Image (tube, rainbow, N blue to C red):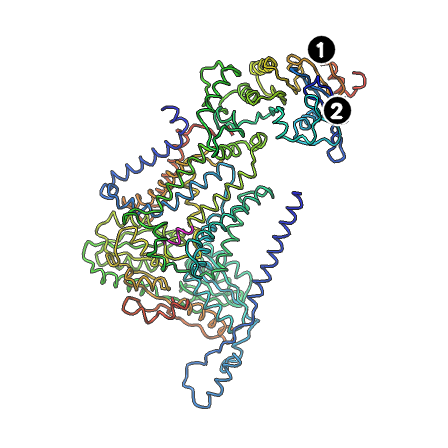
Amino acid sequence: MNDNNFLMQTINISKYYGSIQALKGVSIDVGYNEILGLVGDNGAGKTSLIKTMTGVQQPDSGEIYWKGKKIINLDVARARQLGITTVFQDKALSPQHPIWRNIFMGRELTNKLGLINIKKQKEETLKLMKEKMSFTSATIDTDTIVGFMSGGEQQGVAISRALYFDSELIILDEPTTGLSLTESKKVLDFVISIKKEGKSVVFISHNLFHAHSVADRIVIIDRGKIVGNFIKDSLPLSELEKKMYLIASDEHATI
Amino acid sequence: MNKMLKTIFVAGLCLVLIGSISLFGCKKEAAPAEEAVEAPAEEAPAEEEAVAAEVVAGGESVFIPGLKAMPDIHIIFFSGGDPGDAYGGTVYKGAVDAQAILGCKVDYVFSGWDSEKMTKQFREAVALKPDAICMMGHAGPEALTPIAEEANAAGIYVQWLNVDNPEARAKFGGSFIGPNMLAQGEAVAAKVAEFASLKAGDAVIVVSDWKNPTRAIREQVSVDYLEAKGFKVIKVNVTGEMGTNPELLIPELSGAYLANPDVKAIIQPGNQALGATPMYFDAMNLQPGDITVGGFGLDPTVLEVIKSGYVQVTAGQHGYMEGFLGIISAAMYLLYGYGTITYDNSAALITKDNYMDVEKTVNAGVGF
Amino acid sequence: MKKYFDSHRLDISVSFFFVLVMIIFIIARPEVFLSYKIYMAVFNTLGLVAILTVTVVFLIVVGEIDLSFPSVIGMAGWIFALLFKVGINPYICFFIALIVCSFIGFLNGIMVTKLGLSSLVVTLSMNFLLRGLIVIGSQAENISLVPLRASFFRSLFVGNLGGIFPVQMIWAVAFTVFFYFLFYRHRFGGHVCFIGDNTLSAGEMGIRVDRVKITTFIMVGFSSAFVGILSSLLNNVFYATSGSGYLLLILAAVFLGGTPTWGGIGTIIGALMGAFIISFIQTGIIAVGLTGYFTDFFFGLIMIIALISHRFTGGNLRKLK
């Protein structure tokens, strides 16, 4: 059942928390160079699914494939190695520190003794900012304290960090939540530019409008099961909204 | 795995707790020392020698019936400082030895020389309704006399150690065992003035816990004496922290010394500070004898520095006697309604000329 | 140049404050503060305070606190003096005391990270427990170290270079330089900051949070031991109460030095300057004649002014947390 055509596949993943089954035989796939929108209500299983895909927790049953090869006992380190990165809702940034430190958090460029090559880190950060983040604001440079940046800019830093470390699959967990319209636009443009780099994205969001605008494909998850898998072009936004509304009203059988 | 580790760790801690309590608890309840109670100082006629032998063997007073094995008597004893304290520790030792001889029940209270704490603890002690309380008067008569009144009403016998409470003693009675602070303060100040050959305009640094007036009684007496004689006094404040770590006084002491070139002497409040004199002199680039140092307190370290010439004079004080007599006199009073005494436990001024006389007691840890 | 200033704001502002305070003292009593003597005298204590202050910064930045270090100071002094009294070579006594106290730091770290206990409560309890052990074990007796008075061993740690310069100050500088590099330039320092700033993020980014925290506790245990032995050597005697006097002093120096209470960011140079300020304020106030009752008041006043000045020069980073 594994397919070399997909970047990542999960087949029949189930996960229990005590007696509650959070994931019921979930099978999804993420293609190469694809933006997959993952939508669903709170508690539907989005976070659980992502945790399984990134190695934060182990599924109770099911298989995971990466580039056609089966992966056993996926953990966070291994996931990183393979090229799977998550940008969490809290962006995993250190607000009191500058960009050049944040980019390399946990992955500092050091010599044998562990001393950070500050010059190199700053250079790489600058390159990253110019090429990938394309920060046009004159007031931001490598030494800018992250906490003083806007929410959208912070997302930019977090996502660029993922890109820098050669991630092939970037999972964005609620990247536009709490951002203003302008800021959200910035992030969405950014997400699209990731695709231009040849990477894949799983875009998790409550905001159907945002998810729909960037995704190539939309997957709907409800109560631990995949209940919809649509190519964007075949599913206008209004239709998506209707389906989500039906789910909320508990008539998922009809979607 | 984690859960198991946690359980093992907590179980281990509990075992350690139970183990230590049983171990140390048992130690305290060890059989009281079979020490002889000294027969009252009287001429012992020949036939009494046989009786004396019996005293040594049985450990019971021949002449005061009941003065031994008094498990029914409950005394709450204030040692003033903390268990690790130099002077408080000596008082404590005296009391413990007395308790061992008499076999009575004694609860020891430690207060870190904190007046507020002592007051609170006094109140709590009265609530426990012991037979007697050996209290220290540092917190002052205003705070303590009302509580002493409550004690009196409850039938508790209160006596005073170290710092007197004349008001309470006038109203309710009780012994006082402690130093004559006035005499000590003046004696030391006079000796220091003499050794330093102080002239008009000379200055003396007097170190004490000035914020706590009851702790600085003697030093204040010294200050008054020196100022009356026309000498300048520079007061340097020592905090509790500097008591536990004398090196922390260096910045203030050196500041006072270097800013006042007419300083010819230093008076220190306790044996920790006196014992640290070599360290202070090193820091200030002084040789022993460059300036006169005097103070209050005596222990092996202070003896050392007197020997080596860093300190010229100190006032001794019998801490052990304070504790010992405190317990004995309380017990006597409870048995027979007499035994209240006033005992001045201040000892001689110790200098390099007479320190050898007290060396043995001091080195045994029971002379002060 | 501006970049350096920006990234080291706290260090520079604290140093500036110290210089300002000293200038006031120099103007008030030039004959005291323009002579080397007062500095040599204060360095005796300052060296000890500084060693521990620069170490504690790591712990505060990582988001924890250690209130057991006063007893660890005492513990080290006790172990050293005890073993020395029994006749063991002082270098070995020194080594053993360091190991034992580093292990105590390790225990603190384990209890905080693996058992999830609040570091404030755990270390406070440990403080009592250890002090109790010391008092029980030593029976509240002092242990004399006078035999070491003229030894090379003593002069190595608390002697006077050239007869006047306290060696402990050199040790303090060595500690400061090492920790400076460890904090700003080393991966470990970066991790300490990240954990204190946003523990969750740090963990998500693969930083071994528990390991780093335990290491900072061990560091404090080690430095406390170092200071404890040096303190006993300096006094030529071990006091059973040794160490308790350092609690507020060290914490005040750390915070006066500009390291905020909320973690994630800190300054090593600032900590050193904080120690300087604390020590010299005491001296200066006395030297200018504000003896007796005035000391506390001016001490507190200067501290508050220092803290306010941090707020203005250090930038308002508090709202970022």
Circle 2 chain = A
Above-or-below relation of B329 to A197: below
Please give left or right for residue A225 compared with residue A184 in the image. Answer: right
Image point (41%, 38%), residue name: C178
Label 2 sits on what residue type? Answer: Ile
Above-or-below relation of A135 to B108: above
Asked if residue A180 shows in the view, the reply is: yes
Q: Residues within 10 Å of mark 2 (few under 14, many from 20)?
A: some
The stretch drawn in magenta includes residue B151: no
Please give left or right for residue C209 compared with residue B140 in the image. Answer: right
Please give left or right for residue C267 compared with residue A55 in the image. Answer: left
Q: Pointer 2: what residue?
A: A11
1 and 2 marks on the same chain: yes
Looking at this view, is B316 or C167 the one in front?
Answer: C167
Q: Secondary structure at mark 2?
A: strand
Above-or-below relation of A116 to B70: above
Image point (62%, 56%), residue name: B15
Tell me where residue B24 appears, x and y as whole percent.
Answer: 56, 62
Q: Pointer 1: what residue?
A: A238
Tell me where residue B193 appears, x and y as whole percent.
Answer: 23, 61
Label 1 sits on what residue type? Answer: Ser
Above-or-below relation of A122 to B116: above
Mark sitting earlier along the chain (1/2): 2
